[in-house]
Amino acid sequence: MAEFSETETGQAEKRRRRSRKGEERRAKILTAAMRRFAEDGYQNAAIGDIARDVGLSLPGLLHHFPTKVDLLLAILAKRDLESADFIGHYRSDLPGLLKGMVEIFRRNAGMIEVVRAFAILNAESLMKDHPAKAWFLDRATDMQNGIAATFERAIADGSIDGGIDSRAMAAELIAVMDGLQMLWLRDPDRFDMVGGLEAYVDRLLASLGLKP
């Protein structure tokens, strides 16, 4: 068994501390950037303002994220991973997937600034040459494909009518979720997006002959 000197052990511990500190700082930068994107939009947000928000110089922030595009892509990747981990528990069948969407809305209701930032980025990504254009397109395509595949499995096992257009149902679900979310973002104190989606899902399950 290899033995390590006290000096080597101490150096390894310092590296671990630096690594943890770096991860914590990156997380703070991403949180501050999300807030700025929610307030100003990606195009108008200044990376220098984000640096000041976390008490860093501009070179200090650029050490972690060399460009604003790198910062944006890191935010998108983090959000995508969190959403994939969350929805993964509900993919077993169609009722589970639909109920999982309600739970995502329930979780999102507690993080309005994050949801607002993504709604703004999503809209901005429609602009020509926007750095997140491909990411949001791929995300929308993957979401529609995933929902459609769940409907197709339900058709294949006889749970729902075989005449249902799975891709059209997926598009409808995405449109309902986007619309409810937008209404909530405009007036979160008066509009219940979770209740709205929950009622829609219950009606959909009933129309499909499935238990709500």
Image (tube, rainbow, N blue to C red):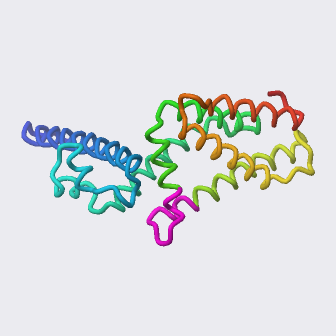
Q: Position of residue 65 (x, y in %)?
A: 28, 57
Q: Would residue 132 be found to the left or right of residue 14 on screen? A: right
Q: Is residue 50 left or right of residue 87?
A: left
From this view, report whether residue 184 is shown above or below residue 39: above
In screen coordinates, is 204 left or right of 65?
right
Residue 157 place in picture, x, y as percent: 87, 43
| Membership of 136 in magenta stretch | yes
**Range of residues picked out in magenta:** 123-137
Looking at the rendered image, the quarter that the C terminus falls into is top right
- Quarter of the rendering containing residue 141: bottom right
Instruction: Provide residue 5's location: percent of width, then percent of height.
Output: 9, 39
- At 86% from the left and 32% from the top, the residue drawn is 206
Q: Residue at x 49, y 49 (%)?
A: 118
Measuring 55% from the left and 44% from the top, which residue is drawn there? 84
117 vs 69: above or below: above
Q: Residue furthest left?
A: 7
Q: Which part of the image, by quadrant, shows the N terminus? A: top left
Q: Quadrant of residue 113?
A: top left
| 208 drawn magenta | no
For this rendering, which residue is in front, 121 or 102?
121
Whether 204 is drawn above or below 117: the answer is above
Front residue of 117/146: it is: 117
